[in-house]
């Protein structure tokens, strides 16, 4: 009978194998979370990407909402209103602009035009959704349900993911997908 010549893997080789498995599991988990959190929506020829908002401190009366709307169609449309009754009875579309070194903000009661084949970004310092008279502070990690109403495409319910108080880009914005 021949002697048993099986060799147990060396400790360093075992550590490398375990570390590779852990790294792979971590990457898969992060990509899955990023994909699940960075919710995108489609309504007809409109693509609505990454609705998000910021957490607000206690006592804050307003919050801003951000997203990107791409009109892939041949006909212009318009975002005419947003509602979010769970957090605010009044929601307006606003625009911020720099004029003569002064930042101005104004409500857009007629909505925001979405040109055919164009993209409109709602982001800090530009177009945004304004949640007015918040019923409670917006808390990081939560989701805000809202309905977007378009002139031609109709309406769609979306979730705005609540990020950190000072956040300036959507969650997982720079994560590889």
Image (cartoon, rainbow, N blue to C red):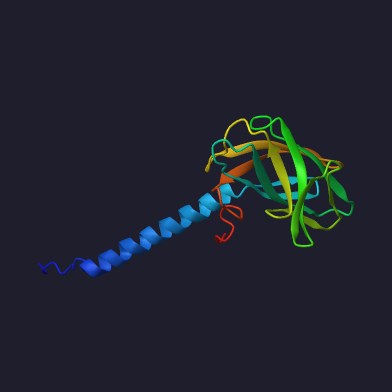
Q: Residue at x 77, y 43 (%)?
A: 93
Q: Residue at x 57, y 38 (%)?
A: 138
Residue 90: image quadrant is: top right
Reply above or below: 102 against 85. below
| 139 sits to left or right of 154 | left
Question: Residue 78's x, y, as percent?
Answer: 85, 46
Which of 55/19 is in front?
Answer: 55
Residue 176: image quadrant is: bottom right
Which of 23/160 is in front?
Answer: 160
Assign the N terminus to one quadrant of the image. bottom left
Question: Residue 116's x, y, as percent?
Answer: 86, 55
Reply above or below: 63 against 121. above
Question: Residue 9's x, y, as percent?
Answer: 22, 67
| 13 sits to left or right of 170 | left
Tell me how many marks there are: 0
Assign the C terminus to one quadrant of the image. bottom right
Q: Residue at x 68, y 30 (%)?
A: 85
Question: Residue 57's x, y, as percent?
Answer: 54, 41
Residue 150: image quadrant is: top right
Q: Residue at x 13, y 66 (%)?
A: 4
């Amino acid at each position: 009978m021949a002697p048993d010549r099986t060799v147990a893997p060396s400790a360093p080789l075992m550590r490398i194998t375990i570390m590779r498995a852990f790294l792979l599991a971590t990457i898969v988990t992060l990509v899955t979370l990023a994909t699940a959190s960075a919710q995108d929506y489609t309504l007809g020829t409109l693509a609505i990407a990454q609705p998000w908002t910021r957490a607000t401190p206690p006592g804050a009366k307003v919050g801003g909402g951000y997203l990107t709307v791409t009109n892939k169609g041949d006909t212009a449309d318009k975002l005419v209103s947003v509602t979010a009754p769970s957090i605010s009875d009044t929601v307006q579309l606003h625009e911020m602009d720099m004029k003569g070194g002064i930042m101005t903000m104004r409500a857009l009661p007629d909505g925001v035009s979405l040109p055919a084949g164009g993209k409109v970004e709602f982001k800090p310092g530009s177009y945004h959704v304004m949640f007015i008279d918040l019923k409670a502070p917006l808390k990081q990690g939560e989701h805000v349900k809202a309905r977007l109403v378009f002139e031609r495409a109709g309406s769609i319910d979306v979730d705005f993911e609540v990020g950190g108080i000072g956040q300036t880009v959507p969650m997982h914005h720079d994560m590889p997908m």
